[in-house]
Amino acid sequence: MAATLFISYCLVFTALLVFAEYRDLPRIRWIAKPLASACFVFAAVSAGALDSIYGVWVLAALILCMAGDILLIPAGSRTFLAGMGAFALGHAAYIAAFVSGGPDFGIAFLAAAGAMVIFATLALIWLWPHLGSFRWPVTGYAVIIAVMVVTSTLASLPGGGSVVMVILGTFAFALSDLAVAREKFVSPNFLNKAWGLPLYYGAQLVLAASV
């Protein structure tokens, strides 16, 4: 019940954040974004994240992503790099969660690996001319998020839930990062946030619920 409540709060604060981005309201952004992120952390705790190794790793990933969310609020390059670093650590924690049950490499893993190699390569080809000094940090980030999506096929959920939802959650996370990249490097406009933010928070809620 508590987890459902935090999920509802997260959706409300996400809507408020999108509104703040639309109207360019920095004070509301500084309130809504940390609260929306805190809600997916508390949703995981309420769902039982502390009861399993998988859940603890997912919780660590969510906390690191919350730190990344806050670091991305300012517009500076240094905080953006710090935010990327926090998210990269979050992806690493997700990877640890997904392999914590003992990986079983099969057709799904190989198919996901092939798909993500294509996805990451196309994304980098698109972004490369716009990245400047961020080329290698973004390349490293693309690699780790691709690995996260691929290893999601190996997840062994504590409650016996569907791994399909976890795979969809990680892929939605990867797609939402394209919105962040487009906003930062290619074409800044509200539409990036209008679809990227709901997709990101929805992905985190799916992963939080998987514990």
Image (cartoon, helix red, strand yellow):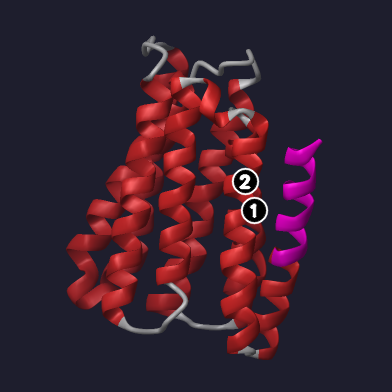
Amino acid type for the residue under numbered disc 1: Cys
Dot 2, crowdedness within 10 Å: few (<14), some or many (≥20)? many
Instruction: Tell me the quarter of the image containing the N terminus.
Output: top right
Against 167, is 141 above or below? Answer: below
Mark 2 touches mark 1? (CB < 8 Å): yes
Relative side of 175 to 140, left or right: right
Against 140, is 181 above or below? Answer: below
Instruction: Tell me the quarter of the image containing the C terminus.
Output: top right
Instruction: Please tell me the numbered disc located at residue 138.
Output: none
Res. 117 image quadrant: top left
Where disc 2 sits, the SS reads helix
Is residue 193 at all visible to an observer of this figure? yes
Give, as a single range, the part of the protein colored magenta: 1-13
Q: Position of residue 196 (x, y in %)?
A: 59, 63
Residue shown at 58% from the left, 22% from the top: 163
Against 23, is 69 above or below? Answer: above
Res. 154 image quadrant: top left
Q: Which residue is mark 2?
A: 42
Dot 1, crowdedness within 10 Å: few (<14), some or many (≥20)? many
Report, in whole angstroms, how far the alpha carbon at label 2 lies from the one at label 1: 5 Å
Tell me which secondary structure the magenta stretch mostly adopts: helix
Is residue 114 at all visible to an observer of this figure? no
Q: Which residue is mark 1?
A: 39
Compare residues 28 and 123 and report the one nearer the observer: 28
Residue shown at 47% from the left, 61% from the top: 178
Q: Is residue 206 magenta?
A: no
Res. 147 image quadrant: top left
Q: Position of residue 111 (x, y in %)?
A: 43, 24
Amino acid type for the residue under numbered disc 2: Phe
